[in-house]
Amino acid sequence: MPRPRSSKYRDLPEGLYFKGKKGYVLRRIDDSWKSLGHDKSRAIALARRYNATYRVDPEIAHPINFDLVAPHNRRAVEKLSSFFARVSERYAEDDKPNRDTLAMFNSRLEKLNSLIGDRVGMSISLDDVNLVLDTVAKDKSNNVFNRWLSFMVKVFDYAVDESVMKDNPAKRKKRKPKEEKQRQRLNLDEYKSIWIHAPQWMRIAMDLSLETTHAVNEICAMKYEDITMLDEPVLEDGIEVFGYLKVHRQKVKAKEASRVSIPVTRSLLKIVEASKDNVESPYIVHRMPVKCSNQISQYCDHITQVNRKYLSRVFSALRDKAKVKKNVSAECKPTFHEIRGLSIHLYDKAGHDPQARAAHSDSRSTKIYKEGHVKWVQVPAAELDIWQ
């Protein structure tokens, strides 16, 4: 029988101690120590959960013999780590996420497994959801908090579907309000000051984004073969059109509005022609890397294709070199994505509706394919041509 705890620890669960500046620490059953921070209620909840799992009275403890558990009840005593090991494959098959989304899902799943993987699914409650959020989203933005909550809702929905859990406690957790956008907008004068400092391939990327309204994913993926040139130019709304550029916006790729056919006006044609140099590349925005490794970037399929993350990083460096928003905090400075916002603003100011051109999803949620054919949204002819 363990000796009674001293009075100053009597209100704490077994194994939990308060060590002044060190905060609350837990003595585990292997005599190792784990710091649990200074939040008393959180430390107590974690200690109780640990004790319920590992400090079980030998009189009632027993190993689980799955051979003796009825087949229809085996999922009820399955540890979440076993369920987590297979849920990623199911998510990939059902949702068909892109590579980055799947990688993020697996990263969060690994973190969730480290926090509650040793638990039986049926024992997970709203308290556990709160503990996970306290660990992964404390002092983070509301957006991070909500993304983690949405992730747990999805994972636990799968668990309920497979009878690993009875209900989804994450659905009972209240989301935090959406935060106002922190990044400041980019104006045309600032755009031009960054452009002056940019190398040719970045200038092409910036001008292409401004003229088409599209963001870094689409800009880095645009190929010369995506352009269909006309034998003779035609007039559309009084503007000369030389061909059409087809763009499939990946962020809303399941929406009908995600596929747009943008008229190649004289302004857009000048950008495409300016991109052609002595580098052989299928991509409109391209560069020959200074250091050629044996492997092509995971975001690229050709050595001359510009890695979208590299493009964003170089743009931010050029922005700082041009001293744009120099007195603004780093998280509020405009990124390459803000060129899209500037473009939409300029088209709207010029009297052109930018929605179709920008491939914004509309109220319709019909599938991309209709009667076996891909439907492309034809965009009205318009151009900015800020350099005229």
Image (cartoon, grey):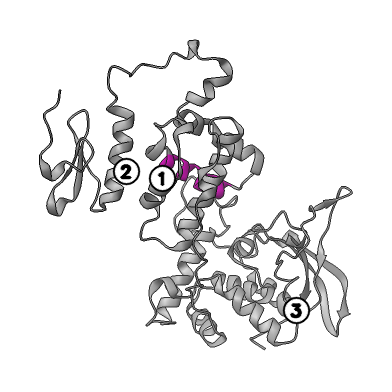
Front one among 85 and 57: 57
Front one among 139 and 214: 139
Label 3 and label 2: CA atoms lie apart by: 55 Å
User: Residue 353, labelled with which disc?
Assistant: 3
Front one among 82 and 313: 82
In the displayed structure, 60 sits above or below 227; it is: above
How many residues crowd around disc 3 within 10 Å: few (fewer than 14), some, or many (20 or more)? Answer: some
- Left or right side of 75 for 351: right
Mark 2 — residue? 45
How many residues crowd around disc 1 within 10 Å: few (fewer than 14), some, or many (20 or more)? Answer: some
- Left or right side of 164 for 12: left
Q: Which residues are magenta?
A: 99-112
Q: Residue at x 58, y 75 (%)?
A: 339
What residue type is disc 3 on? Answer: Asp
Q: Quadrant of the C terminus?
A: bottom right
What is the quadrant of residue 138 in the picture? bottom left
Q: Residue at x 46, y 68 (%)?
A: 314
What residue type is disc 2 on? Answer: Ala
Is there CB contact under 8 Å for labels 2 and 1?
yes
User: Residue 127, labelled with which disc?
Assistant: 1
